[in-house]
Image: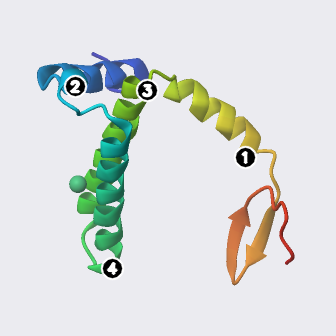
Amino acid sequence: MNRDSYSDMLAEVQAFHDKHDFKNTGGEELMYRIALMAEELGEISACASKGKSVEQLAEECADLMILLMGTAIAQNFDLKRAFWGKMEKIMKRESKMINGRIRVSEFRDQVL
Ligand SMILES: [Mg+2]
C-alpha cells in the first residue's frame, strides 16, 4: 500500500464500507451521509470554538474526508477527477476582499 496514493486511500475506504456492508445497510444512502458530514463539520467547528488541538482538528478533518470519499463510492463518481476539474476552475477565478477577508468566487449577481 502506498499511503500517498489516492487510489489506495479510496480502496481503504471501500474496504471499510465492505467490512460493515454499508451498501446493504443504509450506510451509503445520500441523505444519511449528508447528515454524517454535517455532524463532522460541527466537530471541526467545535475544534475552533472550543480551542482544541491541531491534532484533534486533523482527526475531524480526516473523518470528513473519509465520508467524502465514501460518498463518491456510494454515488459512483470520481472524486479525484472532480477535484482536479474544480481546481482548474477556481485557479482561474478572481478574488475580492469582502469584510476584511479574501473571497474567491465567480461573483455572479452580486452588488459589492
Ligand atoms: Mg469526528
- Residue position for label 3: 75
Q: Is residue 34 left or right of residue 60?
A: right
Q: Tell me which corner region of the image, top left, top right, bottom left or bottom right, holds residue 97.
A: bottom right
Q: Secondary structure at mark 1?
A: helix
- Which amino acid is tagged 2? His
Q: Earlier in the sequence, mark 2 or mark 3?
A: 2
- When the figure is inspected, residue 76 is found, relative to residue 40, above or below; the finding is above
Instruction: Look at the numbered discs 3 and 1 and tell me whether their residues touch, using CB distance below 8 Å.
Output: no
What residue appears at the point 34 percent right and 47 percent down from the top-left corner?
64
Marks 2/4: CA distance? 31 Å
Instruction: Look at the numbered discs 4 and 1 and tell me whether their residues touch, using CB distance below 8 Å.
Output: no
Q: Nearer the viewer, mark 2 or mark 3?
A: 3
Q: Earlier in the sequence, mark 1 or mark 2?
A: 2
Number of labels in the image equals 4
Q: Earlier in the sequence, mark 2 or mark 4?
A: 2
What residue appears at the point 70 percent right and 84 percent down from the top-left corner?
99
- Residue position for label 4: 49
> Split into 4 quadrants, where in the image is the N terminus?
top left
- When the figure is inspected, residue 19 is found, relative to residue 39, above or below; the finding is above
What residue appears at the point 23 percent right and 61 percent down from the top-left corner?
56
Which sits in the foreground, 13 or 5? 13
- Residue position for label 1: 90
Q: Earlier in the sequence, mark 3 or mark 1?
A: 3
Q: Which mark is residue 17?
A: 2
